[in-house]
Image: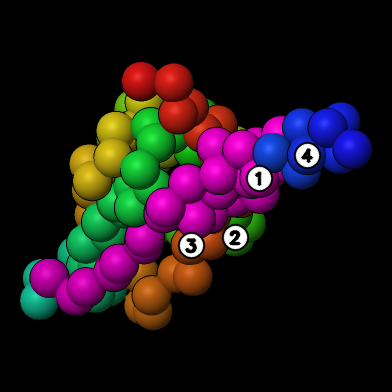
């Protein structure tokens, strides 16, 4: 009987550790808010967009990757902020993004590109 309670306690404890109060899990990509706004500037005939990516998780995240297949821009994006590699883009050179921190970049395109979180490493130890 005591072993059942220990097992139940362990399951609840692990659920709290891995989910946390912000709903961030090391097993699926989440906890990143992606907001895009028009800047009002026109670059080479294309609308300029400002992308703000914020870590909404209570834990730090690193190696953040976005789906970006077919992403094209008329404005150079600093590769240390957004490095395009095939259908994925590495954000912030893979460096840690702490809770509530944001990474921003600009791009120019005829329409808003639908960036989606693909992957991140969640670190709740600090």
Vertical relation: 20 (above or below) 73? above
Residue positioned 28% across, 40% down in the render: 99
Task: Give the distance between the C-alpha atoms of the residues marked 2 and 4, in whole angstroms.
Answer: 52 Å
Residue positioned 36% across, 60% down in the render: 33
Magenta-colored stretch includes residue 62: no
Residue highlighted by disc 1:
12
Residue highlighted by disc 3:
115
Task: Give the distance between the C-alpha atoms of the residues marked 4 and 1, in whole angstroms.
Answer: 11 Å
Work out whether mark 3 precedes mark 1 in sequence or the reverse, and give the earlier one. Answer: 1
Span highlighted in magenta in the image: 10-39
Magenta-colored stretch includes residue 33: yes
Residue highlighted by disc 2:
70
Q: Secondary structure at mark 4?
A: helix
Quarter of the N terminus within the rendering: top right
Asked which quadrant contains residue 120, the reply is top right
Which percent across, then down, holds residue 53? 31, 53
Q: Residues within 10 Å of mark 2 (few under 14, many from 20)?
A: few
Q: Which mark is residue 73?
A: none
Tags 2 and 4 touching, CB below 8 Å = no
Asked which quadrant contains residue 97, the reply is top left
Task: Give the distance between the C-alpha atoms of the residues marked 2 and 3, in whole angstroms.
Answer: 11 Å
Using residue 116 as the reference point, say whether residue 35 is left or right of it: left
Residue closest to the eye, 99 or 72: 99
User: Is residue 13 shown to the viewer in this render?
Assistant: yes
Q: Secondary structure at mark 1?
A: helix
Using residue 58 as the reference point, say whether residue 13 is left or right of it: right
């Amino acid at each position: 009987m005591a072993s059942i309670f220990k097992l139940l306690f362990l399951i609840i404890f692990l659920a709290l550790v891995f989910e946390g109060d912000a709903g961030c899990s090391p097993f699926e990509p989440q906890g990143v808010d992606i907001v895009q706004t028009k800047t009002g500037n026109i670059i080479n005939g294309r609308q300029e967009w400002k992308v703000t990516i914020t870590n909404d998780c209570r834990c730090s995240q690193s190696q953040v990757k976005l789906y970006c297949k077919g992403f094209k821009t008329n404005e150079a994006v600093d590769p240390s902020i957004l490095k395009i590699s095939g259908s994925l883009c590495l954000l912030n050179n893979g460096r840690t993004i702490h809770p509530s921190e944001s990474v921003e970049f600009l791009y120019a395109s005829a329409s808003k590109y639908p960036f989606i979180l693909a992957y991140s490493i969640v670190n709740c130890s600090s």
